[in-house]
Image: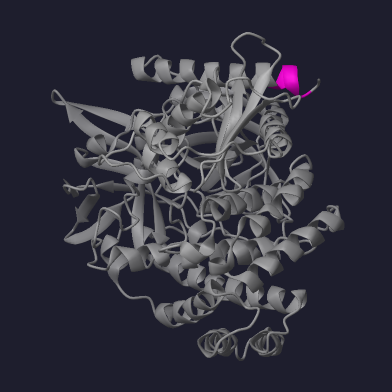
Amino acid sequence: MRTDLLADPVDGLDEALAAVDAFDDALVAGLLRPQPAQTDGLAALADALGGTPLASLVAEAADKTAAGAAGEDHFVALAAARTALMGSVHDALTARVADVTGRPAAEAPEQPADGDEPAANVLAAARAWLCDLARAGWQGLDHELVGGAAPVVSAMLPDPALRRQATLLDGFAAELAASCPGATLDRIPVRRWADLWSRALLLTLPGAARTPAGSTATGRLLPLGVDVQEHATAVQAQVHAVFEPADGAPPRLVRAAASAPKPDTVVGAGLWQLLRPRMSLLTAVSEGRAMDLDGMPVTAEGDLVWDDERARVGEPADPFATARVALATATDPVTAPLDRHPVRIAVPVLLEGYAAERADDGTVTFTVAGHRLAVDTDRVPDAGPLTPEAIAASGACLGLLRWDAGAFLLQPLAVETTVRKKTVAVHAGAWAGGTTDKAGVRAEKAATDAVAVLRERAGRLLRS
Amino acid sequence: MFRRSGVNIPFDVHGRSALSVWERSSAARVVPPARPRKLAKVPFVELADGRLQGVVSSGSDIGRVYVSSIAAGTYAFACSTNNNRPCGGARGSFCNHLRALVTEAVLQYGARRVARYLKAETTEGEPDAQALLSAMTATRPAQGDTSAAAPVFSRFLRHLAYLELESATAPLPEMQWFPPTRAVA
């Protein structure tokens, strides 16, 4: 691990992000009647795309938008331009991460296969809403505007082919609703909302959410840890693992995810309860076991599309042993072209021999070979035994290397600490499959009760 | 409130101002998650449409619920059953359903966020549900009409419908934008 490279500047990064920021700033006041500062931002985005296949399309979109005459196609072109720039940032950072880990990359995925296209009407409605948002700007947010997303989301959620779009719009709209009215916001998550806006807009295009053609995986799956993502009405747990193909091909890093929509009052251990029945792998992770896969579907991006019928529980497997033996040589999956964005960077790494420190405000920093690396303890799920205190007292950390807001950071998945001269491993996802831990049992009980009340109310009121 | 947001930490490990870091973060935490609470009495509460609003289970009839709301700023209050019969207790001032609504909202969102949303000024430093209720009732708020009851009830049903949706194992790459947070409101 060349952790010293993490703090080195990346060529072209600042320039690409400056163009992104210029556009993002233009979205703050809305693009209905752009002021000179905003038209400069639009021009900066168009300039950055000069010489690319998108150049003329984006230049025209920037002109029309600057004149206050943008149509939906123009907004889509601007979102595509911003996505392309973020894609280039992703590529530069991914190349740097490869230098740091020294791991080989898997082969680039092929073009997505043709598939059934989801209903166009609801996607057109989503696009119209997103264009209204861009015209109003974040400072122009009000309840009526934000409320326009609700019927779109309700129409999308039951359709599995639209789950990606629905989940994104739902989380985005909830944030916007909580931030109304926009005129009185004292701070605005400028990059984040521009990210979500452009991502959502591109996902309304035919084929945008199509996954790259996949294959099947047969062999041994050795879990490394669990990453949880959640917003008020959705949760996803992603297991990162090393896959050893049965045919003797080189080991590769893969992920397996389970996700579910949820009421906002289902939190903590309730998240595990929603996902547990869908994926036996979560139980295997809790028990510290490998799994044997037989013909499990896997996308070209390295995502297993989990099916319990194609997996059975295997031998005990310690994630730290897996990391020490297999992590250095396993190939990293390659992200599909349209999905490239710095937020997608989540690269399993093993760190040892660092000095951990915890500041008064709770932030944890690891100093590795003289270089400081921020530790994102906030990402460690609440419903688990891993705590910022344990991380600050650790001697080895299995985590995900991420990048946000201009710097690399480490998300811990598990740590090794020394308790009474013995090494003990603490895993963030230890409660994924259930737990006998006292605090865990209490959290499980509270979550069970909450869901029971909601189901009782639903049974009585939804069908009456 | 948010550990990386600029409220508590003026500078990050690279010496950059936390506000500018937050504004240029893709994974900035904007809305803290709901805190766990018991749902039996008040199965649904939300800060939306310019109101604190929700659904309160009737203490006597298991098939009946009350739809209760308090408007931000004016504290105009309303309480009626899901069949639009007015609540007998909500004449002149807050009924027990409205009191329960405020108490549970404070548990779910934290008193500070509820106070900020309702624009309720409390005198003491750290507000609680009791202080919030006193501050609002002291202004002798008017009784609002119950026209909001139907949309609030349908939002509650929509909320319950999330339980009926299938879980899935196809990856959702967009969830990378929604990291969890240990921080609470």
Q: Which residues are magenta?
A: A458-462
Residue A460: in magenta span: yes
Nearer-the-camera pick, A187 or B141: B141
Q: Quadrant of residue A456?
A: top right
Nearer-the-camera pick, A133 or B4: A133
Model colouring: one colour
Labels in figure, total: 0
Nearer-the-camera pick, A461 or A261: A461
The single residue placed furthest to the top in the displayed view is B60
Q: Where in the figure is residue B51, as x and y percent of width and height?
A: 56, 43
Q: Where in the figure is residue A122, as x and y percent of width and height?
A: 81, 54
Tell me: residue B59, above or below residue A216.
above
A117 with respect to A288 (left or right):
right
- The residue positioned 18% from the left and 30% from the top of the image is A418
Residue A236 seen in the current view: yes
Q: Where in the figure is residue A346, as x and y percent of width and height?
A: 46, 53
Residue A284 seen in the current view: no
- The residue positioned 53% from the left and 48% from the top of the image is A250
Residue B150: in magenta span: no
**Which quarter of the rendered picture does the C terminus of chain B lie within?**
top left
A261 with respect to A380 (left or right):
right
